[in-house]
Amino acid sequence: MKKMLNTLYVTSEDAYAALNGETVEISFADKENKRIPLHTLENIVLFSYKGASPELMGKCEEYGIPICFFSPRGKYLATVGAAIKGNVLLRKTQYRFSDDENESLRISRNIITGKLYNSEQILLRVTRDHPFQVDVQGIVTAAKRIDEYLMMARAAETKESLRGIEGLAASEYFGMFNELILRQKSDFKFSVRTRRPPLDRINALLSFAYVLLSNMCASALLSVGMDPYVGFLHTDKPGRKSLALDLMEEFRSILADRLVLTLINNRVINEGHFAVQSSGAVILTDEGKKIFLSKWQEKKRTEIMHPYLKEKITWGLAPYSQAMLLARYLRGDIDEYPPFFWR
């Protein structure tokens, strides 16, 4: 259980939320119950199939406190309470900002700044941790170029130019990605990013991780009452969760890519966990997916210090914290959207 600012996150799978006087009481199978006064809360987010009592849901409706339900794996299930009524103004603001070139550019610049900074840190980290196994000079050169693109991104005057800068930085980053493979090099070789379909084992892992990450970001946006389909950087397309794709940009390298590299370098995933389809697409086998999902859940439970909130949270809650901060910016509670800078 985690209270972050005015949102209560309950991440224990066996937790049950009920009303106790003027408090929400969280009961667990193996530990002491917790109580939080309702008047201190703006949102309740539950990652538990046990859910909440009808009495609590009724009281939250009365007080205007939405309860968002997710599966333990992070799939969005439903929202009860005042989420739709209480967030209509937030969504209208989101739609206005999305249509406004200057407002959407301002948010997009911060998102890409966070992405490029985190990509640069991923590269520099491996030169410090494994200086005798990698091309230090090549990686440092690529990191410096990414830093230059970061400065250009901060000054971009259109979203089109911002996307171009982001593409150039991505080329530098993925140009060094093969250097980050420290073990099983003969089985895992990376040359270029391929998406539809992934044409090698690393791309298969990256694509699978990005799907999980985008779903987690979409769930995070729903939990604060935003529309995951209306973005600022990614253009609107039917069926595409553009805002979820925006939000995940900051986390691609530090959450998805790092996990992929860890699974390869620790030999948790090997060549036997892949299959090649007749189309040439490389996919994870059922066993490979099972292993990946297990490690994904484990990663999400790892604690980190949020760089802006200065609070300890888990990786699984990091997209939720960013969705909350984005909502606060749209409501005018903070002056700028603060991207997630990995330390």
Image (spheres, rainbow, N blue to C red):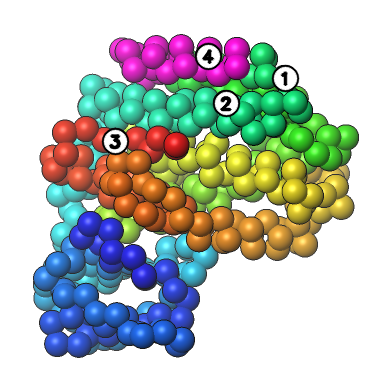
- The amino acid at mark 3 is Pro
Q: Residue 309: x, y in percent?
A: 28, 46
Label ID, residue 124 = 2
Q: In terms of depth relative to the viewer, which is nearer, 168 or 83? A: 168
For the residues labelled 1 and 2, say whether their Cβ atoms are less than 8 Å apart: no
- The amino acid at mark 2 is Leu
Q: Which residue is mark 1?
A: 135
- The amino acid at mark 1 is Asp
Residue at (55, 52) in percent of width and height: 212
Q: Which residue is mark 4?
A: 144
Find the magenta span and give its range.
140-162
Secondary structure state at the residue bearing disc 4 = helix
Residue at (85, 47) in percent of width and height: 271
- The amino acid at mark 4 is Lys
Secondary structure state at the residue bearing disc 3 = loop
Quick one: label 1 or label 4, which is nearer the N terminus?
1
**How far, Cα to Cα, is label 1 from label 2?**
11 Å
